[in-house]
Structures are given as structure tokens and as C-alpha cells.
Amino acid sequence: MLADTLYVLVAFPYGLVGFVVLFCSFMVGAANVVTLLGLPVLFAAMYLARWFANGERAMLARVLQVPAARVNYKQPPPDSGWWRRIVTPLTDGQNWLDLGHGIVAFGTSLASFILLATWWAGALGGVSYPIWAWAIPQGPDDQQFHQLLGLPDTMFVNVTVQFSMGLVFLITLPPVARGAAMLRALPARGMLYSVAGLRDRITDLEEQTVEARAQTAAAVSAEATALRRLERDIHDGPQQRLVRLAMDLGRAQHQLDIDPDAARATVNEALAQTRETLAELRALSRGIAPPILADRGLVAAVSALAGRSIVPVEVDWPGLDNTTDARPRLDAAVENAAYFVIAEALTNIAKHSHATECNVSLERDGGYLLIEIRDNGVGGAHVSKGHGLAGLADRVRAAGGVLTIDSPDGGPTRLLAELPCV
């Protein structure tokens, strides 16, 4: 109540001064705009309106109990001349709304001030009436009022009636004070934030569009990189072994009639090639989407990765063990992205880091899955294009996450991936 009252009391003289200054400057500028001499005056009126509007916004933040918002006005280009600097504020809709508010707000300030002043006077005057009632003689109006209510014309009745009315004013003062403050504040908020709010929403949508396009491009890049790597691995591994298997089987076919023992040895070699080919195909399939990930979850799949790693790996998963965590499993897309991050990171550690130990930590933090991978290798890892971690960064970004790598020369290396999991 006191904050609302203070706002109304301050807004009345503030609005009066703003009305006089802005109305006079606007009329002078508008009257001379044909001769172009009024444009500098209108320019000054716009900046004065902006100054009064910023003061009003500071007061609105207190009375509406919202964070103070800063409005971004249209700015001229840095290398523009003085004429462009004068004209640019005149093309900003928010500047005109600021000017209109400075002129119109005096009416709402006056109405809210009269309403609140009347209520405060009624409350304070009625409640304190028994103290000073003796100093005021009763007149004909008091007698007519008592007759209208059917009450006897006595001092006690008069004091009782006035005190009761004062109590009514005092009890209803908080909602009336709030209503008077809103009478002044709500039109001000509508005028001082409308264009700016719309501009901010447009900016947010543009940023979201850019981010969505970047995520799409990252997803396409990540999938293309994964497909190229898969094609290379198949060509260098299973495909070569299948070619050799076909040659061995053809040689065994020719040896069956002339040298059965040699044919038997060739068939045994072909069987060994078949087993190795199947092992490589299983390894490739685990890199795409291992069955253990779908069947038993991320923790089991990461534990399996750690067990196959050349470098000793310790896995921590606080709050992610589904046997003890009541929350449901992560979304399949999040689990796949997390598994890919860890698998690729462990592969890079085994190939390039010369590390002797590694730690993988999985943790839910609010709406994000945090993946932290540390090793004691030689460091020097980064996500520049042309390096192995670039595809990993694209995969994380495609999932809406962020990848951070801290890997100074000489180590250690810390990789942190944040994936949204809401």
C-alpha cells in the first residue's frame, strides 16, 4: 500500500512536468517541421521523452514487482552523418510511444492522484475525527444528514458516523491504492514496452531460427562424417577380409582334387577370416547403436565400452542407475548421442592421447545430462575442422547441447558435453 501510494504521489508531479516539457517541445517542432527547422526540435523532444520514459520504467519495475527491463532503441549506423542521426529517432515507433505516453500520462496521473488523495483524506479524517470533532460546530448539513439516516442529532452520533466512515475508507484503502497505482501503471507499461517487447520477441525468434538452422547443419555434418567413417571402416576392414575370403574359397575349390590337405588348411584360414570379419562387423554395429544400449540402458552400454577400452576407464554415474533411480530412462535420442560422445572420445584417447587412465562421469543436472571425460594424456585436443573431434562437436550441437574441451599441451584433457534431457 505504501509503495503504491508513493508511486502515485511521485507520478503526479513527474507526469505534470513531463506533459509540459514534451507537449511544448512537440508543438514547437511540429509547427516548424515544414521548414525543416522543427526536426532538431522533434529530435530533442524524442530524447526528452526517452529520458522521462526510462524514469517511468524504473518506477514501474518497483510497483509491478518485475525486473527492470532495458529497451533497445533503433540506432543510426556508426558512420552516419548528423542528419541521419537526427532522422533515425523519428523513425522508431517506440520513441513516438514514449512521447505519447509523456503527454497522455498526465491525465492518468491526475485521476489516480485525486482518487487516492480522496481515500487517504477520508480514512485519516474519519479515524481521527473523535480527536478534533469538538473544534468544529455542527451545521445544517449535519442535521439533514442525520435526519436522512433517521438518527438523533447529537455530538456522539456525529462522531460515531464519521469514525465509521473513516474505518470503511481505511479498510478499503489497500485495494484502492493498488487500483490507483494500476490506473497509472498499466497504460504506461502498454505504451513503454509494446514496440520494444515485439522487437525483442522478433529478435528471439530470429535467434531461435538461426540456432535451429545451425543444429540442422550440425546434424547433417555429423551424419555425413559418421557415414564416411563407416564406409571407410567397412572398406578397410570387412570388405578386404571378404575379398580375401572369396579368394581363399576359390583356391580351396581348386585344391580339393589335387591336394585335399592344402584345401583343408585353406578352408580353416577362410573360417578364421570369417570369424574376424564377424567380429569387426559387431564392433562397427556397436559404434552405431549397440543392442545393450537399447536393452539395458546407457550405464550398461558405457560400462561395456569401458571394459573393451585399451586405456583403463573408471565410470561414475551418480543418479543414473535405473535400479536405484526412480526417474524413467533418458530419451533414446539422448542416450544414443551420449553413447556416441563417449565411444568417440574413448577411441580418440586410445589412439592419440598416450594416456594411462581415464575417468567417465555421467550425471543429471536439472534438465541436462552432463558427460565429463578426463584423461592424463599429452593433451592438445581441439575441435577445429579437420580434426577428429569436429564431428563429435557437430553431433552434440545437433542434439541441442554444448561441447567444451580443455586440453592444454602436456595434458590433462577434460571433455564436457551438456545434452538436454527434458
Image: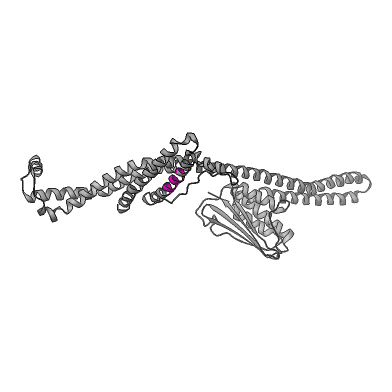
The spot of residue 405 in percent (x, y) is 65, 58
In percent of the image, x 55 and y 44: which residue is there? 82
Nearest to the observer: residue 390 or residue 141 = 141
Nearest to the observer: residue 56 or residue 333 = 56
Q: Is residue 149 left or right of residue 268?
A: left
In percent of the image, x 8 and y 45: which residue is there? 139
Q: Quadrant of residue 215?
A: top right
Scheme of colours in the image: one colour
- The reply to whether the magenta stretch includes residue 307 is no
The spot of residue 184 in percent (x, y) is 34, 44
Q: Main secondary structure of the magenta part?
A: helix
Is residue 190 shown to the viewer in this render? no
Nearest to the observer: residue 417 or residue 49 = 49
Q: Is residue 382 left or right of residue 299?
A: right
Task: Tell me: residue 33, above or below residue 10.
Answer: above
The span shown in magenta is 45-54
Which residue is situated farthest in the top direction here? 34
Is residue 36 shown to the viewer in this render? yes
The spot of residue 8 in percent (x, y) is 32, 48
Nearest to the observer: residue 134 or residue 373 = 134
- Count how many numbered circles sit on residues in the image: 0
The spot of residue 387 in percent (x, y) is 72, 53
Q: Is residue 251 left or right of residue 206?
A: right
